[in-house]
Amino acid sequence: MRIAIASDHAATDLKAELRDWLIEQGHEVADLGPDKSESVDYPDYGFKLAGVVADGTAERGIALCGSGIGISMAVNRNPAVRCALVSEPLSAVLSREHNDANCLAMGARLTGVEMAKACVTAFLETEFAGGRHQRRVDKLANS
């Protein structure tokens, strides 16, 4: 799968861990930055991530910041993207099954590496259920 990953300065370490792990799992990963832990603005990286998911360059996106809140808000500004902020795998599963989320957000200050990997695994392995959920996702796209 083609996956894009981006963070702010608070999540560069988690981003690097997840990027390397995803590559080991056989995924094609685009690291959209930043590379250093110097202060940056999460909207810049959230917008960049949303753009590559919206245009199809990446099939899924992973957005990280200190809490996951700010970057998820930035990513969700793009109407073609549905980014779910999660902290455990069940939420990641439901974000895919019910909401057809194409981006996942997590907080590096709140989610450890192993839990983050469990969330990403659930997110990547779960299919959208469609059915009654499709009309709701359609409403998001048409609002």
Image (cartoon, grey):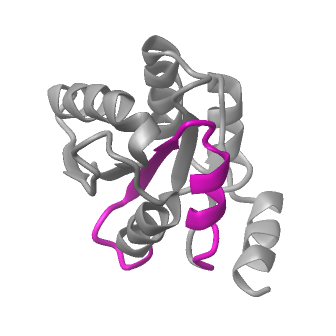
Q: Residue at x 74, y 68 (%)?
A: 137
Please state if 110 lies on the left or on the right of 133 as rendered.
left
Residue at image point 64% right, 34% down: 93
Residue 124 figure quarter: top left
- Which residues make up the magenta segment? 54-79
Give how far across and how far down residue 67 sits, in percent.
Answer: 63, 37
- State the residue at coordinates (41%, 47%): 7
* Relative height, residue 39 to residue 49 (above, below): above
Of residue 73 and residue 93, the one placed in the foreground of this image is: 73
The image quadrant that residue 136 belongs to is bottom right
Image location (x, y in percent) of residue 54: 44, 75
Residue at the extreme front of the image, as rendered: 38
Whole-percent x, y for residue 8 in the image: 43, 48
The residue sitting at 63% across, 74% down in the picture is 77
Instruction: Give the left or right position of residue 13, taking residue 24 as reference.
Output: right
**Residue 59 left/right relative to 87:** left
Q: Which quarter of the picture shows residue 32?
A: bottom left
Q: How many dots with numbers?
A: 0
Q: Nearer the viewer, residue 87 or 34?
A: 34
Membership of 13 in magenta stretch: no
Q: Nearer the viewer, residue 60 or 77?
A: 77
Residue 72 forms part of the magenta stretch: yes
- The quadrant of the picture occupied by the C terminus is bottom right
Q: Position of residue 140 (x, y in %)?
A: 76, 75
Q: Nearer the viewer, residue 94 or 50?
A: 50
